[in-house]
Amino acid sequence: MEEINAMLLVREYIRENRLSKSSLSRSLGMTISAFVRRIDGDYVDTVFLQKLCRVCNHDFFNDVSELMGMEVHSEKIHELDKEIEMLNREKKLLEKLLLEK
């Protein structure tokens, strides 16, 4: 499997969306130089990537999973969430009926 450089994805996203590095660094509580050093690297820890997701309002983890061929099927997840809600309502109704007997 080919290695995926998550920081390359971050750098491309910042460039394509014309995000301000100084604004992002402030949002992360970092100096601009420390921020640039981190994003110019080839490796990233998941905590930092999670913080980048929050300040960029973008899911870089999903980008990585798509590149790995493990695309998240959000539509299917949404369908399953709805089914769970429906089953929970049915469960409550059945419990209520049992208690009434």
Image (cartoon, grey):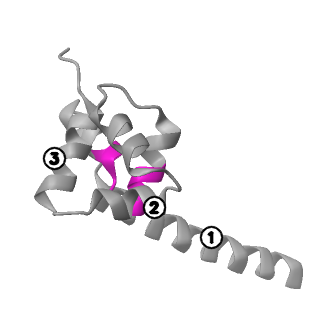
Nearer to us in this view, 90 or 68? 68
Residue at 24 percent of width and 28 percent of height: 5
Q: Secondary structure at mark 1?
A: helix
Q: Find out whether residue 52 is within the magenta segment.
A: yes
Q: Which residue is labeled 2 in the image? A: 26
Near mark 2 (Cα within 10 A), the count class, few <14, some 14-19 or many ≥20, is some
Q: Nearer the viewer, residue 13 or 38?
A: 38
Residue 69's image quarter? top left
Q: Which mark is residue 64?
A: none
Check the picture and name the quadrant holding the N terminus.
Answer: top left
Q: Which residue is mark 1?
A: 88
Measuring from the top left, give residue 28's x and y in whole percent: 49, 56
- The magenta-colored residue range is 51-62
From this view, report whether residue 92 is shown above or below residue 26. below
Regarding residue 84, the answer to whether it shows in the image is yes
In the depicted view, which residue is nearer to us: 39 or 3? 39
Spot occupied by residue 68 in the image (x, y as percentages of width and height):
23, 30
Which residue is found at the position 69% from the left and 80% from the top? 93
- What residue does disc 3 label? 12
